[in-house]
Amino acid sequence: MTAVAGDPTDPASRGKYADRLDPELWDYIDRVNSWYPPEIVAAPIVEQRMVYDRMCVAFHQGHPEGVTTSDGLVATAAHTIPVRRYRMVGNAAAAIVVYYHGGGFVLGNLDSHDDICAEICAGTGFEVVSVDYRLAPEHLHPASFDDAFAAFKWAASTSALPIVLCGESAGGNLAAAVAQATRRQERDAVGQVLIYPGLGGDETWRSYVEHAEAPLLSVSDIEFYRRIRSAPGQSQDDPTFSPLRDRDFSGLPPTIIVTAECDPLSSDGEVYRDRILAAGGQAWWREEPRLVHSFLRARPTVPRAAEAFARIVADVHALGAATER
């Protein structure tokens, strides 16, 4: 995450975004930058994670009443994948949400997006399974995808309930890649909700150019995260790395992509929707106005972010509760 040039708390340095974003959102951006300053990207990864984790604790909203959690492990042939399951007390869930957190494939864990998962559980009544996939640079691609795929297969093998894939930012990339990898298997997702996902789109396209230096995520940040997760000789055309590089978008479940207007990644959502529609599928793209990347964490203090999150929860519920598959 980064900020616009200069002192991010100085209105004169906010450039074209000074009036484009609401004051409450600027307060949120300033708070993020106070916890996780732009210069942290030059620090060792261990330090970046410590600072990021402290920020996540500071923003944590707790759990809605009635949400319970249990931690477990998904076993693979080589290692185990930590997961956290969220359930509502006294409620028989009608679906499972497999959730992949954001953090550029470098940051994040079961705690970093814990309150978001709890609120999705409370808002939908569904069980939520949050996946602590392996992170780069210790584990290069396809480690994160392999874990995301394995967690989905585990959820499908342990319950007959319909599964909705959901992820934000890097997690949106993983959700899309898993949907594409499992679409013609015996158990596939009934829907996917991708929240400001990075899908490997064309960086000469609309939002990448218009919002190359947007608050909290810049094109240079995107390039940093892409490099740090890349194995030697990594192909950009690998759909498990860049879902938009796939050549076949047929057979995907109903898909909802939600992006922020002032985010270089927004065009990825638009293009992904168009590719699914062109292949005969169902897809909807919603660009939330006057918001930036990572706006989910702003939901307690920024009305636009709260309203956008409420729509996302409703989207997840609608896909999981649909009777016609």
Image (cartoon, rainbow, N blue to C red):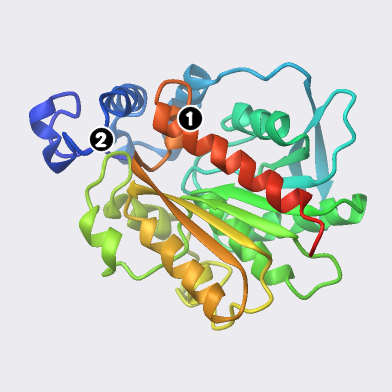
Dot 1 lies on which element? helix
Is 186 placed left or right of 235 in the picture?
Answer: right
> Spatial distance from mark 2 to mark 1, Cα to Cα?
15 Å
Q: Residues within 10 Å of mark 2 (few under 14, many from 20)?
A: some
Quadrant location of the N terminus in the rendered image: top left
* Residue 199, horizontal then vertical, whole percent: 47, 63
Residue displayed at 81% across by 30% down: 87
Between discs 2 and 1, the one toward the N terminus: 2
Q: State left or right for residue 205 relative to residue 271.
A: left
Give the camera-side residue of 89 and 72: 89
Quadrant in which the C terminus appears: bottom right
Q: Amino acid at mark 1?
A: Ala
**Toward the viewer: 201 or 229?**
201
Disc 2 designates what residue?
A: 21
Residue 206 against residue 11 in the figure, above or below: below
Q: Residues within 10 Å of mark 1 (few under 14, many from 20)?
A: some
Residue beneath the point at 85% across and 38% down = 93
Is residue 261 in view from this perspective? yes
**Mark 2 and mark 1 residues within 8 Å of each other at the beta carbon:** no
Mark 1 = which residue? 306
